[in-house]
Amino acid sequence: KAGVTQTPRYLIKTRGQQVTLSCSPISGHRSVSWYQQTPGQGLQFLFEYFSETQRNKGNFPGRFSGRQFSNSRSEMNVSTLELGDSALYLCASSLAGTREGPGELFFGEGSRLTVL
Amino acid sequence: KQEVTQIPAALSVPEGENLVLNCSFTDSAIYNLQWFRQDPGKGLTSLLLIQSSQREQTSGRLNASLDKSSGRSTLYIAASQPGDSATYLCAVPPGRFGNEKLTFGTGTRLTIIP
C-alpha cells in the first residue's frame, strides 16, 4: 500500500514568487493536513481538508492557502514568498475521525522549500 | 491551549541500553496520543498511537504508556540500537471530534552510541 506522496521534494524560489506543493494521501484516506516545520518554531499546523472542505486552519497569513480535490489529493500554495517561508512542508493523511477520536496520522517525506 | 513538552531535548546512550523518553501535555482532555520518529531531513514515521482509554501500547521493542490524569506519556525503547538514532516526537489532537490537528512537542534527539 503506497504511503503519502509529496511533490516536489526540493525546490528553490526567490522572494516574491509563489509556489504550489502537492500531496497524494494514502488510498482511502479522506483527511489531509499540512504542517510547516522550521528549526525555530518546530512543527506548526497550517490547515486540514476533509471531503474537499477546509475543516481546520492554523495561525498563518492569507498567503498560505490550500485545496483538496475529489480524489482527496491536496495542494497548498504560498504566494509572495518571504525568506521566513523557508521550511520543510509536511503533508499527513488519515481516515476520517470517528466518535472515538481523530485517526492515526501518516506523514509524507515532505517538500523542502528554500526561499532566496 | 494545549502545550506539549518533551524533556530532555537530547539524549545519548550506549548501544544495548533500555531508555525512556518523556512527553507531558497540559490539557488532559485528549482522544489519543501519537509517537513519531523523524530522521534528519525526512518526514515523520508513526510509531505508536495510544488511545485515551488505553494505558499501554506495544510494537516490537517499543512500549508507550499514557497517564491522562497526570498529563504524561512515556516511550520505552528496549535494547537500543544505532538505527534508533533519530528525533522522537509526541503529538496530541485537541479533545474535539473531527479535528485532525495535532499539537507537537519539540522532540527528543536520541543518539545511540555504538
Image (cartoon, helix red, strand yellow):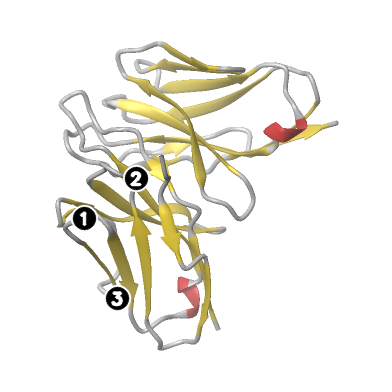
Residue A75 horizontal/vertical position (percent): 30, 65
Tag 2 subunit = A
SS under mark 1: loop
First in residue order: circle 1 vs circle 3? 3
Residue A44 horizontal/vertical position (percent): 40, 54
Asked whether disc 3 touches disc 2, contact meaning CB atoms under 8 Å apart, the reply is: no
Asked whether disc 1 touches disc 3, contact meaning CB atoms under 8 Å apart, the reply is: no
Please state, as top left, top right, bottom left or bottom right, where the N terminus of chain A lies in the image: top left
> Same chain for marks 3 and 2?
yes
- Residue for point 26% across, 37% down: A95
Residue identifier under label 3: A63
Q: Using the image as rendered, state which of residue B22 and residue B83 is in the foreground.
A: B83
Please state, as top left, top right, bottom left or bottom right, where the C terminus of chain A lies in the image: bottom right
Distance of label 1 from label 2 (alpha carbons):
11 Å
SS under mark 3: loop
Tag 3 subunit = A
Q: Amino acid at mark 3?
A: Arg
Residue identifier under label 2: A26
Residue identifier under label 1: A71
Q: Amino acid at mark 1?
A: Asn
- Residue for point 85% across, 31% down: B114
Asked whether disc 1 touches disc 2, contact meaning CB atoms under 8 Å apart, the reply is: no
First in residue order: circle 1 vs circle 2? 2
Question: Which numbered mark, 1 or 3, is in the foreground of this view?
Answer: 1
First in residue order: circle 3 vs circle 2? 2
Distance of label 1 from label 3 (alpha carbons):
25 Å
